[in-house]
Amino acid sequence: MELRLDGKVALVTGGSKGIGRAIAHAYAAAGAKVMISSRKEDALRAAAADMPGTVEWFAANAGDPDDAAACVDATVRRLGGIDILVNNAATNPYMGPMIDIDVARADKTVQVNQRGVLVWTQLAWKAGMSDRGGAVINMASTGGLAVTPGIAYYSVTKAAVIHITRQLGFELAPKVRVNAIAPGLVKTDMARALWETSEEAIARRTPLRRLGVPEDIANMALFLASDAASWITGQTFVVDGGAQLAPGLG
Ligand SMILES: NC(=O)c1ccc[n+]([C@@H]2O[C@H](COP(=O)([O-])OP(=O)(O)OC[C@H]3O[C@@H](n4cnc5c(N)ncnc54)[C@H](OP(=O)(O)O)[C@@H]3O)[C@@H](O)[C@H]2O)c1
């Protein structure tokens, strides 16, 4: 089955690198017009230039509602509307026991990872998705499904993303489908501290014997955005090489 997105417009936050960049690339290759967004202009410009088809960029902090509104406006103006929104941008400004996190970093984690998912979806809905229909894909994490030493408050926001996905899946049906992906450990800059020095050991413990690469997640994001997923909403799909099957070993 070939999954195509011809005639669709997709907006991908955190689209300049890692998982978001792979998703944007997969969507563009499948025929969608794509807007990528993140904070750094140079990285966005370089990423957009490296993708097939029509790919535009707009600098925006996913945790800032004014930036989000400006990016959604620009997408509608330049590309004609929004059919697919990928809420992929996230941050993890604190590592350590959750009991010690300071309020400033706790707030930042919520603003980008959790409130951002709600705000961008509200804006896309009001910008026309409510009429033309569409698909929203939220980036959760297997951290949102289990206790995670070191990245606990980040994982709290990912658990919230999983529930926001259920709630909005219910509220926005039947016009808009809302689903989430919960990746396991994927080799990107964000997760580098978790895999760089122990990749082989982690791979040995993972049933499918390797860490994830961004394209593993992009394949699921392409399926969820496509008509092949037209009877699926409110769900979270784990893509983790089987790591959740025996989490005690992970
Ligand atoms: N890698 C993993 O193992 C893993 C596992 C589970 C879930 N995830 C999730 O997958 C998603 C993508 O992560 P990744 O691993 O691909 O990370 P990454 O390679 O570090 O890429 C993160 C992207 O998000 C952007 N970004 C970061 N903070 C932002 C903000 N405040 N506003 C707008 N854009 C922002 C970055 O660009 P700028 O810095 O220029 O803004 C970049 O484009 C995240 O939701 C993450 O939680 C990752």
Image (cartoon, rainbow, N blue to C red):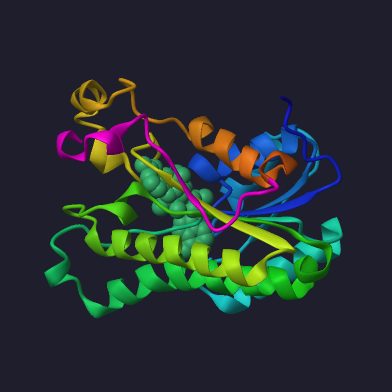
User: On the image, which quarter does residue 90 sit in?
Assistant: bottom left
44, 184: nearer the viewer:
184
User: In x, y percent, where is residue 204?
Assistant: 22, 21
User: In x, y percent, where is residue 171?
Assistant: 62, 72
User: On the image, which quarter does residue 163 sit in?
Assistant: bottom left
Residue at x-position 15% and y-position 59% = 96
User: In x, y percent, where is residue 87?
Assistant: 56, 58
Q: Is residue 158 left or right of residue 165?
A: left
The correct choice, above or below, for 174 with respect to 216 in the image is below
Residue at x-position 30% and y-position 64% = 156
Q: Is residue 32 magenta?
A: no
Look at the image and give the residue range highlighted in magenta: 230-250
35, 149: nearer the viewer:
149
Residue at x-position 56% and y-position 38% = 220
Q: Does the magenta stretch include residue 231?
A: yes
The correct choice, above or below, for 5 with respect to 96 in the image is above
Q: In this view, does 47 lie to the left or right of 91?
A: right
Quarter containing the N terminus: top right
Q: How many labels does the image show?
A: 0
2, 26: nearer the viewer:
2
- Residue 68 is at least partly visible in this image: no
Residue at x-position 82% and y-position 69% = 131
Quarter containing the C terminus: top left
